[in-house]
Image (cartoon, grey):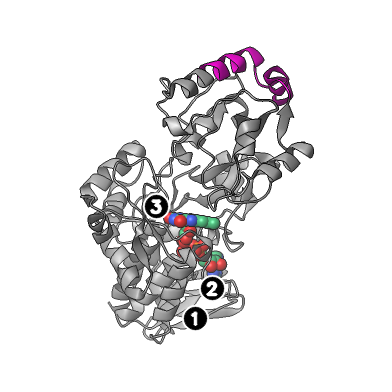
Amino acid sequence: MDHPDYDVAVIGAGGAGMSAALTAASDGARVVLVEAGDQVGGSTVLSGGVFYAAGTHIQRQMGFTDSAEAMYRYYMAVNRHDVVPDLVRKLCEESADTLNWLIALGVDYRPEGLYYSGAEEIPRGHKPVGLGASIVAALDAALGKHPVDVALRTRVTALITDSSGQVCGFRSGSETISAGAVVLTTGGFGSNPEKLQRYFPDAASAGDWTWYIGSKGSQGEGLDLGQSVGADIVGFNRGLVLLTDNFAHDVQAQLPAWLLFATQGGHRFVNESTNMAIVVEMVLGMPGRQCFGIFDEDSRLACHCATERNPSYQCELLASLADSGKLIRAMSLESLAEQAGIDADALLETVKTYNNAAEAGHDERFFKDAALLKTIRRPPFYAVRYKPASVALTATGLSIDAHARVLDEAGRQIPGLYAAGETTGGVLGKIYTASGNSIANAIIFGRTAGRNAALFAKK
Ligand SMILES: Cc1cc2nc3c(=O)[nH]c(=O)nc-3n(C[C@H](O)[C@H](O)[C@H](O)COP(=O)(O)OP(=O)(O)OC[C@H]3O[C@@H](n4cnc5c(N)ncnc54)[C@H](O)[C@@H]3O)c2cc1C
């Protein structure tokens, strides 16, 4: 196309799309950023903004020596190498620079925001002041300094191709806009029950317990748009689904680590302070895909403050949940087991062993920190039923290469088409590596897509 309306059209204005648009515009491209919603931000604006990165100056400031190589090895081990190595390598190698890019744009990542966000040996989770909203605000402010056209309330309904098969624009309803290259950054499909069923059945399997914590705009339209021009979909049944008690639609990023987690068979199965993504994987493999959090009256009375990572654990709230029947309560462990459908003999034995560990201050089965071991002796006793049902993000999506070019089933590039963020697959594995993985993915590949789409359009 000789004179397209724009050099680069970016579809979807979350973290990935805003990063792509900003990068393409900084490289001199004429850019349109198209957003279906009435404001920019997508799920990114709702997020914690945690960014997973290695070898950062913040880590060094806190006395940690880390490297992209160490992050890569950890990432590949956690995912049993079942991810696209080139993409993961890029994610690791560009993580520190990209975090600095966000900081230079004004996002306030501080040393005290550094924490262990997965099961890593060196903390790599970087949490900003102002959470994900601060990332979106910084990107928005930076975009305002470039002549980027931002089209809100504009849902892209189709891609257009030229006679050679090159993607050369899009359609929104009856309007057609031409572009030298198109970047798909439409986010995940957590808000679309049909796509959850099709692409992330583990998340859909909790039936009416399943709910999505993100943006309504996460309809998976990027997958349809990509497929309409031959894109391959990779990473089946992946994403992050959190355990939920179904008390309310609250985000529970971490369950209280002082609970005793038991299977329906009455057995303790994990160190309860283990990263939630790992616990979820275990629960998904259990009969009934559920587990139980067991505690007693002393523990309930000690629950005084809900935290941002878990709003449910306050003693009065727990009492009212028990009154309403949502939390199982009984005066004996046998009766608790019977009400919950747990094997009573096994549960009694499990609690006995756990109480001994708590009294000895040593958990010889799972080595949980002694401070998190609380005896379960004083009635009434409580059991919370947990299911992996709260969908945080999805990770089945368009196949891309390390240049963020969209690929077909044969691994061939679809000319003119790029993608980044939650609409892509292959970067995130079956187990969510750590908090910050998805924002890092969105921003790093968003920038890559923007840069390469601008280059392609210039050619
Ligand atoms: C509550 C919450 C907390 C989270 N916390 C973290 C965290 O701390 N760290 C982390 O790494 N991850 C976190 N995540 C996940 C992370 O936020 C997302 O995976 C990431 O932000 C996705 O970015 P994105 O740009 O790909 O998609 P989004 O930010 O969702 O943006 C996609 C945009 O595309 C638009 N769109 C969709 N279809 C169309 C269409 N057809 N036409 C035009 N526009 C369209 C949507 O409206 C949306 O605005 C969290 C998620 C949630 C919901």
Residue 135, position as x, y percentages in the image? 43, 68
Q: In this view, does 322 lie above or below 391?
A: above
Q: Does the magenta stretch include residue 231?
A: no
The crowding category of the residue bearing disc 3, from other C-alpha atoms within 10 Å (few below 14, some 14 to 19, many at least 20), is: many
Can residue 423 be seen here? The reply is: no
Can residue 15 be seen here? The reply is: yes
Dot 3 or dot 2: first in sequence order is 2
Residue 120, position as x, y percentages in the image? 33, 42
Q: Mark 1 points at which residue?
A: 150
**Can you tell which quarter of the image residue 403 is in?**
bottom left
What residue range appears in magenta? 331-353
Residue 154, position as x, y percentages in the image? 58, 76
Instruction: Check if mark 2's residue and mark 1's residue have beta carbons within 8 Å.
Output: yes
Q: Mark 2 points at which residue?
A: 35
The crowding category of the residue bearing disc 1, from other C-alpha atoms within 10 Å (few below 14, some 14 to 19, many at least 20), is: many
Q: Is residue 351 magenta?
A: yes
For the residue labelled by badge 2, is the local secondary structure a helix, a strand or a loop?
loop
Find the distance from the CA under tag 3 to the CA under tag 1.
27 Å
